[in-house]
Structure formats: C-alpha cells, structure tokens
Amino acid sequence: MTKFVINPNVKKSKIHKEIYGHFSEHLGRCIYEGMYVGEDSPIPNVNGMRTDVVEALKEMKIPVLRWPGGCFADEYHWKDGVGPKENRKKIINTHWGGVVEDNSFGTHEFFELCRQLGCEAYVNGNVGSGTVQEMSEWVEYMTFDGVSPMADWRKENGHEDSWDVAFFGVGNENWGCGGNMTPEFYANEYRRYQTYVRDYKADKKIYKIACGPNVDDYEWTEGVMSTCFRHSQPFQHGFMDGLSLHYYTHPEGWEIKGSATDFDDKVWYKTLSKTLYMEELIRRHGAIMDKYDPKKEIGLIVDEWGTWFTVEPGTNPGFLYQQNTMRDALVAGINLNIFNKHSDRVRMANIAQIVNVLQSVILTEGEKMIKTPT
C-alpha cells in the first residue's frame, strides 16, 4: 500500500503564472488575419482586434504575450510601425514567406491587444540589425511619462500615457537568424544594449532577458554567462534577469519533421519521448547557470516551445501552418508539467505560437475560428 505524507511546512518554489505565456510573431497568419483584421474588416473586431479570438484568449486568461518575434524581431525597426498607417513603411518579411509587411500592426496596436487580453507585455528588441539608440528610444517611447522626444512623439501619435513593459528581450536567436554571433560576441553586445534599456518607472522595473541557447548548445550558455558575469558586481547578476531557451518537439528530426495529423503509434510515442528531453535541457543549462547564479536570481525563460511539424499541404512553407491533435495537447501538458517541476529556475515560458502558427491554441480561416486541443 502506497503512503503519501503531506507536510505543509515544506515549501517548494513558486510557480509563476507567466509559465503559461504565449508568443506572437509577424509570421504567416498569426498577427494578420489571426488576431488583427483592421478596423474596416467585416469580421467583428474592436479597434482592429478580432472579437472572437480575443474572447477565446480571455477565457484562457493568458498572462503574458511576446512580440514581435522570433526571427522577425531582429529585422524589425519599430519606428516603421507607428504614426498614421497610410504613412507606415512597407517591408519584405524575409524570414517568413517573403510577403509584404505593411506595418499596420505596430507598437500601439500591440499594447491595445494586450489591453483587451488583460495580459502583460513581453517586447523583443532588435540586436541583429538595430542600433543601441533605436532600442533605447523604443523603451523611452513605450515607458516614459515625462517630456522627451520619444514620449512627445507617442503623444502626437495618439497615446498620452505610457505603457508598462514587463519583459524585454535583448535580441532573439542571435546564434542564428539574429546575427550568427558567437556567444562571447553576443554577450558583449548584450551588456552594451541592455545598459540603455532604462527603467523609467521606479516601481515597475523591466525584466531584461538575454538570448540563451538553441536546444543543447551548452557552450553558448557557458559563454554568455561567463562573459556577462566578468567584471560585474554580484548585485548585477550578469546584467540580466533572464536567459532564454528554445526547444521544439519534432519526432523525425529537423529536416523531415513529419505530419501533424498522419502518424502511427510509433511516431506518437516518439513525439512524447522527444518532448521529455525538455527536462534534461532545463537541468543541464540550469547547472551551468548555477555556477554563476547559485541563488537562482536569473530565470530560465523558455520563450519558444511546442510541436513543429511539416506544414499543411498547399500552404506557404514560410507560414508554418499546422493542424493540431490530442498528440499536441499531450506535448503541451508534458512541457507545462516540466516547467512547473522546475519553477525554481523556470520563470516564464511562451508556447509557439498563439494563432495559426505551429502549435497554436486557435486556428482561423476567414470569419471562422476554432480552439485546438492544445
């Protein structure tokens, strides 16, 4: 007979609500059509945000939303996405499908979406192709209430009060699409860029997140941590509050990811087995972090996770649209359980992505919307 003993005096770590966070990128139909249709759309909306999608996400009580990327973040120049929409610069989304990005969804629209959802904002800055000044001015534009060039410009663009930025990512995947940097080079860039991510609100400190490893690149974690902690004071804990980690589940490997819906029992179990690898990643990256941060003041931020299968036939390969089954739901449950178990180190996690991309919780097609098993 199994005996369980519950001791209320033995306390474990706090499970942060942000572990149940989400991720949105200018990729495929995630932003456009998925969440934002514009004020003139026949699809019911409030200030351009789809009413059905917003209501469904509000039922989930999502705690935090990451934006604008992803790989898109390191080619996104925020000034292109503010001001009158007819004057906003059009660009090519080189990472995702080569489509035209008209920047009609920008900073103001993102914070309006967060307002409607009642969630915190996680903004990802541009290190790969942006400047320190550009990043600094974006933070000023978003969060400064006083008189300054950027705050004045925000007011001219229709928003008198500043917004709250709970989390700020200093670059994304800078080992790859964010600039193909070495860990030491990125870490020195991080130290420089983060200096100018100012806390304009004494009572609302911005949580700064450094770009962490891809899957099991333990050399990256070691290189970034050692470089950031070098010549820094103990109270600065490497100039970072968090370090990101990305890991996607695909049963057949990166080159041939397999179908989202056509699979046998063997592939089903292989998918779940691959998902369990997340625990080893957290444990081993966490052990490296422990060398520099034994008090666990720096959070591990798993801001991209979920299934990644071959896109649905007939869809743009760059849009990463995939269907969703109970297999995906089990993958989500396994991951969330792992994050909860390791909540002493895991501070936030963001499933990829919220609508119409990879392991989405919602799929849309025109006026139709469904909630997925995830």
Image (cartoon, rainbow, N blue to C red):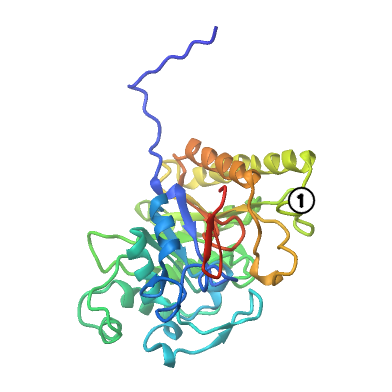
Q: Quick one: which residue is furthest to the bottom in this view? A: 87
* Quadrant of res 204: bottom left
Which residue: 67% across, 56% down?
308
Quarter of the image with the N terminus in it: top right
| Side of 28 relative to 86 (left or right) | right
Under circle 1, the secondary element is loop
The answer to whether residue 14 is visible is: yes
| Relative to 22, residue 92 above or below | below
Residue at mark 1? 262
Pick out the residue farthest to the top.
1
Q: Which class describes the residues within 10 Å of circle 1: few (<14), some (14-19), or many (20+)? A: few
Q: Position of residue 147 (x, y in %)?
A: 20, 82
* 272 over 36 or under it: above or below: above
Residue positioned 70% across, 56% down in the render: 309
Front residue of this view, candidates 228 and 59: 59
Q: Relative to 25, does residue 277 appear above or below in the rendering?
A: above
Image coords of residue 284 (percent x, y): 60, 42
Where is 250 relative to 315, above or below?
Answer: above
On the rendered structure, is 79 left or right of 211?
left
Q: Image point 70% across, 69% down: which residue?
A: 315
Residue at the left extreme of this rendering:
146
Expressed as whole percent of the image width and height from the top left, the position of residue 275 reads 65, 43
Viewer-proximal residue among 191 and 87: 87
Give percent across and percent down for residue 289: 51, 47
56 lies left or right of 325: left
Left or right: 339, with 279 as reference point: left
**Residue 240 shows in this picture:** no
- The amino acid type, in three-letter code, at marker 1 is Asp
